[in-house]
Amino acid sequence: MKAQRMARIDHEIQRILGTLITQELRDPRLAFVTVTRAEVSDDLHQCKVFVSVIGDRHQARQSIDALKNAARFLRGELGHKIDLRHTPELIFVEDRSAERAIALAKTLREVQAQSDAREESSTEEAE
């Protein structure tokens, strides 16, 4: 299947699931969940749905469990809203890329601050 069509399907599934999760699911275990990416297999039988969860590890685990329990409902609703011959099985995966980006930015700021401090001290010694 062409990569362009697969990308459109991925994006459409991401958009629909994001809406369904925020508007249709009423599970108290769900924290603030964002669908960051969807990747459909080449045969369109499975779809990995990457979700980012705002909160601690416990809330993230509970949210993933709630999504796994609601996977059949979400798949059914997805089948009604998207025009595919076969609605893919949904596999939910926690996406921690936002956490890694925040940690990396923090590390870079710390290194920059250390570099600035060294630069200041060497300038003062030179005078």
Image (cartoon, rainbow, N blue to C red):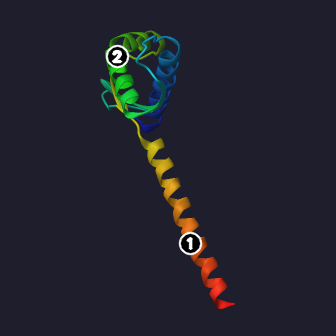
- Quadrant including the N terminus: top left
Q: Which mark is residue 20?
A: none
Residue type at mark 2 is: Ala
Residue 60 % position (x, y) = 39, 29
Binning the other alpha carbons within 10 Å of mark 1 as few (below 14), some (14 to 19) or many (20 upward) gives few
Residue type at mark 1 is: Ser
Q: Nearer the viewer, residue 46 or 63?
A: 63
Q: Nearer the viewer, residue 34 or 106?
A: 106
Binning the other alpha carbons within 10 Å of mark 2 as few (below 14), some (14 to 19) or many (20 upward) gives some
Circles 2 and 1, Cβ within 8 Å, touching? The answer is: no
Q: Nearer the viewer, residue 83 or 77?
A: 77
Residue beneath label 1, please?
115
Residue 5 % position (x, y) = 46, 31
The residue lying at 42 percent from left, 33 percent from top is 56
Q: Name the element at disc 1.
A: helix
- Quadrant including the C terminus: bottom right
The residue lying at 46 percent from left, 10 percent from top is 26
**From what the image shows, is residue 85 above or below residue 32?**
above
- Could one spot residue 1 in this view of the protein? no
The residue lying at 49 percent from left, 30 percent from top is 11
- Could one spot residue 97 in this view of the protein? yes
The quarter holding residue 63 reads top left
Residue 104 % position (x, y) = 48, 54
Q: Which mark is residue 71?
A: 2
Residue 25 % position (x, y) = 45, 12
The residue lying at 65 percent from left, 84 percent from top is 123
**From what the image shows, is residue 17 above or below residue 119?**
above
The quarter holding residue 121 reads bottom right
